[in-house]
Each structure stands twice: as structure tokens, then as C-alpha cells.
Image (spheres, rainbow, N blue to C red):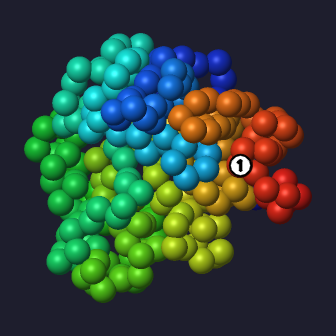
Amino acid sequence: MPATRGASPALDPVLEVADLSVRFGGINAVSDVSLSVMPGRVTGLIGPNGAGKTTTFNVITGLQEPTHGSVFIDGKEISTLPPYKRARLGLARTFQRLEVFGSLTVYENVLAAAEFHKSWSSDPTPPVKVAAEVIDRVGLRRVANARVDALPTGISRLVELGRALATRPRVLLLDEVGSGLNPDETAALGDLMLALVSDGTAILLVEHDVELVMRVCAQIFVLDFGRLIASGTPAEIQNDPGVQAAYLGSDEIAS
């Protein structure tokens, strides 16, 4: 049976963003955006380049101070917490601009994250076991001993994903993690995301591959010029005239 989108019974959001605004000088990068991410689901955040998606990620993870608005995990506000404390609450992310330890091997990148997690968590699992499990799950076993700076960008993005998974996140923010992957790798990535949410992980996905987004997401939020212009199921988003005009071209609509 083919993999399907994650689905959850009526649950409270694990991550919420309320009335978020970010202003850079005279530019409103994000304006009054609210969204929620449910456990056991992939939630999409899409929009044209410059729509404010990565800025929203940066605020959620504590790398950017908002002009206005709040971030909540499990209903508790975390807006004033530094990034490392948010990570310890179960937030992990990848970056639009690739962030890996290029001089280390794939295995060493993932092991480093597992060691960091072990240093503050009560998880009794040995980091070497965590790293081995993650490498197998992400499909990196064949390149485990390769230096990351010698790998194609698409595979390096999977290394970054594996490193995030080694921290045992409850909420995983993925910023264009599919960029640089071929169709088979993209299909495998979609399967992996659906497997992760079936285990209860919540994923917030920024991705320009519309076919992938529509396949894996249960809920999608659409940004345009920093404003939320639509939210709904994949079918609702594809049929929304405002989204079609702002973001989805005729090819994407047809697919």
C-alpha cells in the first residue's frame, strides 16, 4: 500500500505561532502570521521566494527576534528562550543555506548531534547506536564514511536532516530539504517524512517541490509578501484562486 499523509485524531498543536511580525527597517518581512503544527502530521509552509518562510523559521527557533508576536510549544510561550533551550524542548531544523560539518564524515556529523543530545538529555541510548539508526533510516549507509564536503548538495541535505534527527526532535522544521535531490531520492524523502510523522513527530516543511508538498502534507499555510493568504488541505490550497495567482502556476495546478 502506498504511503499516505500523516493523520491525527483531535489533538492540541505541539507548535503554535501567533500574530507574528518581523520588520527589517522599512520592510515588513512577516506580517501578523499565525499557524499551528499538529503532532503526527506534516504541515506545509509554502510561498514564492521572499515570502517570509525562512524568517518565520528563524523566529520559531530563536535565531531572529520578532517585532511582534509569540511562539508556543505545548501551549507554553517560548518567545524569550534562547535557541539551545528551544532545542532541548524538542525543536530541530535544517537550513535553506546548507549547514554541515564539511570536514567530517557523514557518520561523524550525525554522531556529533547524538553526542550533543546525550550531554543534556536523559535518553539512555548510546550516541553510537543513535547515529547508526539514523544513518540507516535516512538512507546514508553507503556514504557513511565519506567526507560531507565531497558529496553532492542533495545528499549533504540528507546529512543535515540526519543530524537533526539525531537530537530526537518532537518538532522538525525542514527548510527546502528536498533541494538537489533526484526524483527517486525525493520520493524516498517523502516516504521518510510520512514514516516520521507516523511515529508522532511533527514536521513543518518549507519546500518548492509542489508535488512533494501536496503528497505529504495534511495542512498547508501559504505566505505571500510576508502575509498569510490561505490555509487548508492540499486540495483546498490547489483550488484557491489567490494561491493560484500568487504561487501555483498552471503546471503545478494540473499535476
Q: What is the x, y in percent for residue 172? A: 43, 43
Question: Is 97 above or below relative to 193?
Answer: below
Image quadrant assignment for residue 77? top left
Question: Is 113 above or below relative to 235?
Answer: below
Mark 1 surroundings: few (<14), some (14-19) or many (≥20) residues within 10 A:
some
Instruction: Report the label total.
Output: 1
Q: What is the x, y in percent for residue 239? A: 86, 40
Q: What is the x, y in percent for residue 102? A: 22, 74
Residue 94 showing in the rendered view: yes
Identity of the residue drawn at 45% across and 23% down: 20
**Closer to the camera in the image, 148 or 167:** 148
Q: Quadrant of the C terminus?
A: bottom right
Q: Residue furthest front?
A: 26
**Closer to the camera in the image, 249 or 159:** 249
55 sits to left or right of 193: left
Label 1 residue SS: loop
Image quadrant assignment for residue 161? bottom left
Identity of the residue drawn at 22% across and 40% down: 123
Q: Residue furthest left?
A: 119
Question: Is 254 above or below relative to 206?
Answer: below
The amino acid sitting under disc 1 is: Tyr
Q: What is the x, y in percent for residue 137? A: 45, 63
141 sits to left or right of 226: left
Identity of the residue drawn at 84% across and 54% down: 253
Residue 196 showing in the rendered view: no
Residue at which label 1 appears: 247
**Closer to the camera in the image, 129 or 92:** 92
Identity of the residue drawn at 21% across and 62% down: 111
Q: Quadrant of the N terminus?
A: bottom right
